[in-house]
Every structure is written in structure tokens, then in C-alpha cells.
Amino acid sequence: MSIVVINALKVPEGSGSELESRFAARKHAVDSAPGFEGFQLLRPVAGEDRYFVYTQWATREDFENWRDNRAPRDHNSSQQPVASGADLLEFEVVELAD
């Protein structure tokens, strides 16, 4: 059963374009991770001021392996973080019968 992991990022006003360009620069960085099924960056429009990083994984174990084993360079940059906070949300994808 696939799972969806959503990272809800608090981004200071006026910093959204910087966040988007950083994600664009690493758009395919996770593509080769075992079990990775997809990624989207969601920009807030109404009723929410956080960005959502939506990823889908074949299993929870695949996500946890990626999270626990990604290279330190992934977040070890000379750039200052754009987001000021993050909340992690996790869901199972419900396979609905016909």
C-alpha cells in the first residue's frame, strides 16, 4: 500500500520564490530512491499560508530508508534555510474497490 508524506513548510512572506527555485534546482534528486513514486510542491493560494511538499512512496519502509540514509549534503549547504518551520503529515493511500 502506497503512503503519502507531506511536509508542511512555514515560509516567511516574500520568500516563496526562493523556496520554489531551490526545489526546482533539485527537482529530480529523489527520483532514483527505491520506492519513490512522485513529488509535488504545492503553493498556498487560499486558506493556508504554508507550502506543502507532497511525496508518494511504495511503502513506509521506502520512505524511512530514504529519510534515514540520504546523504548529509542534502541539507548541508552554505545557503540559509528558507522555511522557518515544518510539520510532517503521513497518510496511507486507500485503494477503493470498484
Image: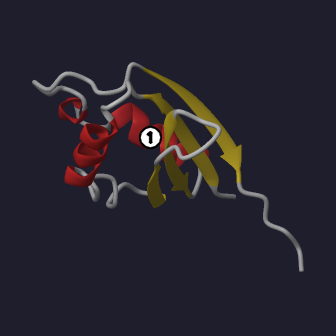
Q: Badge 1: how crowded within 10 Å, few (<14), some, or many (20+)?
A: some
Q: Residue furthest left?
A: 78
Which residue is at a point 57% across and 43% down the rendered structure image? Answer: 5
* Relative side of 29 to 49, left or right: left
Q: How many marks?
A: 1
Question: What colour-coding does the image apply?
Answer: secondary structure
Quadrant of the rendering where the N terminus is positioned = bottom right
**Splitting the image into 4 quarters, where does residue 28 fall?**
bottom left
Percent of width and height locating residue 72: 22, 29
Quadrant of the rendering where the C terminus is positioned = bottom right
* Relative side of 36 to 5, left or right: left
Determine whether 23 is above or below 84 in the image.
below
**Splitting the image into 4 quarters, where does residue 96 fall?**
bottom right
Percent of width and height locating residue 7: 51, 36
Q: Which one is nearer the viewer's eye here, 51 or 45?
A: 45
Q: Which one is nearer the viewer's eye here, 89 or 62?
A: 89
Question: Label 1's element?
Answer: helix
Residue at which label 1 appears: 65
* Relative side of 45 to 40, left or right: right
Percent of width and height locating residue 31: 34, 60
Q: Residue furthest bottom?
A: 98
Which residue is at a point 59% across and 52% down the rendered structure image? Answer: 59
Which residue is at a point 50% across and 51% down the rendered structure image? Answer: 55
- Name the amino acid type tagged 1: Asn
Q: Which one is nearer the viewer's eye here, 86 or 90?
A: 86
Which residue is at a point 40% across and 32% down the rendered structure image? Answer: 68
Percent of width and height locating residue 16: 34, 38
